[in-house]
Image: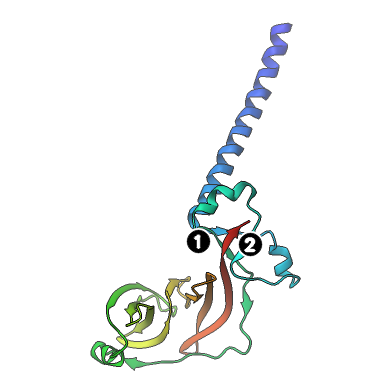
Amino acid sequence: MKNKIIKELILPIIIVALLLAGFSISYDFGFKAGFSKGFALSEKYEEVKNGEAKFECPDLIKGYVYREYDKYPNGVRIDRVPKFVDNPQVIKMNEAYDNKKILESLSGRAKSLNWRSDSFDVNGDDKKEVIILANIYNEYKIPHDIALVLGNGNIIFRIEGIDLKIEENDGNGFVLSEIVDWNTGEYKHTRYIYKDGGFLPIWTQKSCWANFE
């Protein structure tokens, strides 16, 4: 009888132990994965979402369990809720791509160039457009980027800014990321969709680096 009771108790104990171990492992993995991606939610998230708090950069968070990560500057980024663009306008371009002409337009500004490229569908035609980004370092050593989207050999989108990134988004437009302010770690993300032969900005999202108190 005693052995039977012990056997009946062992299985639930083992199950509980496995569940606790799984929770611990998944929590630790999720925590580390979140930090490796550089994203976190501010404890003021709900207040910011409801318009009850001002979202400032850099965003301050009480350190507690995250305190050990404070030694990694710019290690965690806080994203605000996206906001729809008021009265958005379609951006249309269709200019012949001329590398020589582009370089001439940068004359006097560009001290060095570092070109990189990618390709993915941005207008839903199942064909890959070419995305080109050029890093420019001017005489003051300030980084500046030019981003181009090429379709059928023509420039269909062009923008200049700091630390530009264009990311794929389900074959319909793209997400443009750029630095707004180096000093406060403020980033801006803009979602563009393909519409009427051009690109329409539909929402923007503000991001800030977190500082732990």
Give the distance between the C-alpha atoms of the residues marked 1 and 2, in whole angstroms: 12 Å
Expressed as whole percent of the image width and height from the top left, the position of residue 29 reads: 53, 44
Expressed as whole percent of the image width and height from the top left, the position of residue 212 reads: 60, 56
Expressed as whole percent of the image width and height from the top left, the position of residue 149 reads: 37, 82
* Vertical relation: 11 (above or below) 160: above
Mark 1 secondary-structure assignment: loop
Residue shown at 59% from the left, 37% from the top = 24
Mark 2 secondary-structure assignment: strand
Label 1 or label 2, whichever comes before in sequence order: 2
Direction left: furthest residue: 100
The image quadrant that residue 203 belongs to is bottom right
Front-most of 82 and 90?
A: 82
Expressed as whole percent of the image width and height from the top left, the position of residue 113 reads: 28, 78
Which label belongs to residue 12?
none
* Vertical relation: 60 (above or below) 93: above
Residue shown at 35% from the left, 88% from the top = 155
* Vertical relation: 60 (above or below) 115: above
Which label belongs to residue 74?
1
Q: Quadrant of the C terminus?
A: bottom right
Q: Looking at the picture, which amino acid does disc 2 mark?
A: Leu
Residue shown at 64% from the left, 48% from the top = 64
Left or right position of 124 against 133: right
For disc 2, the marked residue is: 60
Left or right position of 12 against 98: right
* Vertical relation: 31 (above or below) 155: above
Front-most of 192 and 83?
A: 83
Mark 1 neighbour density, 10 Å: few (under 14) some (14–19) many (20 or more): some
